[in-house]
Image (cartoon, grey):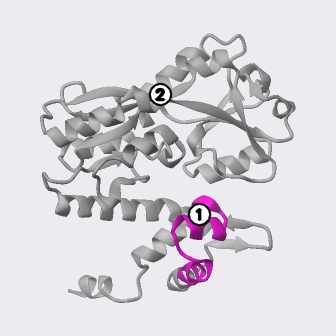
Amino acid sequence: MATAGHLISNNLPSVKQLQCFLAVAHELNFRKAAERLRMTQPPLTRQIQCLEAVLNKPLFNRSTHDVILTDAGRALVIKAEKILQDLNALKMESLASESSLRIGLTRTLNFEFIEPVNRQLSKLNARDDIETPDLTSAQLLQCLSKNMFDLVLTGEKAIGHEDTVQYRWVCREPLLMAIPAGHPASLKDNVSLDDVSDLPLFWFSRSANPSFYDKCERYFEQLATPIKRVKEPEDSLVMLTHIARGKGFALMPRSKCTFTQEGLCYRALIPAEAEKLNIDIYVATRLNEDRETVLQAQAILCDKRFLE
């Protein structure tokens, strides 16, 4: 009972505070975060101040021009995303029904900036919680198998779900190269991997996304100059800060290249590499799916007349 009493006290972070914190952490700009949350800046600032008071530690270092996560702020990003992910899953379980469409979107991509797909999504009779940026493709497929989603949009086909999931190709998301603005390659409109061979690539482990990892590695093996790799930080903002300081480069989906910082720039790949290095987007449904609403949604998302 002592534990329960502690958990129901009013001296805990609220969901709204965590949502506001994550918006600012992703944007590193209070004005942009307020716009993203469809609120004004003063109440957003108050939510952050209240959260810092509850936790008794600063989450951001603020100056006239910059907003930077503190060590405590960076640690909270991962925990806050997990908390909101669990709450979102709880909501979907309690609201599951046959009459409404439940769609999961991989956090690997930002579908708001993939205009053809975003336009098709707006046509569907989906719940307000269609946006699920805190779930990976692998987590989405687990939710799909548990009937927590009706269909999901993933980056690449997952390995090992052939007996339970069917895929239909939607479109292809280009990759951009995030590089230091002071690097000579930044003077080009289209950059090749050879242009940045002096820099290490921030790279992830294969277990995070085997299909995408294997696609890229097959191309890397063909390069004349081997690519040096360093472990990708869990926090992408930390990685981009390292890149801005000249410590490496990264390959990122175009829709996720929205973070700006002095010393950081994004460049398109040369056509030959862009053809090989990209993310294929698929709509995934359960293998035995036969509900008309789900099949119609699948057809809308894969309609090539509107995706070109």
Name of the residue lying farthest toward the front: 305
| Residue 156 seen in the figure | no
* Residue 8 % position (x, y): 29, 85
- In reply to whether residue 37 is colored magenta, the answer given is yes
- Residue 247 is left or right of residue 13, and the answer is right
Nearest to N terminus: mark 2 or mark 1: 1
Quadrant hosting residue 94: bottom left
Q: Amino acid at mark 1?
A: Ala
Task: Identify the mark at residue 212; answer none if there is no mark.
Answer: 2
Overall secondary structure of the magenta section: helix
Highlighted range, magenta: 25-49
Is residue 24 highlighted in magenta? no
On residue 149, the disc is none
CA gap between label 2 and label 1 equals 27 Å
Q: Residues within 10 Å of mark 1 (few under 14, many from 20)?
A: many
With 188 as the anchor, is 11 left or right in this view?
left
Question: Height in image: 146 above or below 14?
Answer: above
Residue occupying the point 51% across, 42% down = 115
| Amino acid type at mark 2 | Phe
Q: Label 2 crowding class (10 Å Cα cut-off): few <14, some 14-19, many 20+?
A: some
Count of marks, rendered view: 2
Report helix, strand or loop for mark 2: helix
Residue at 65 percent across and 71 percent down: it is: 60
Query: Badge 1 is on which residue?
Result: 25
Tell me if residue 123 can be seen: yes
Which residue is found at the position 56% from the left and 42% from the top? 255
| Residue 106 percent coordinates (x, y) | 41, 44
Placement of 97 over or under 114, stated as above or below: below
Q: Is residue 257 left or right of residue 96?
A: right
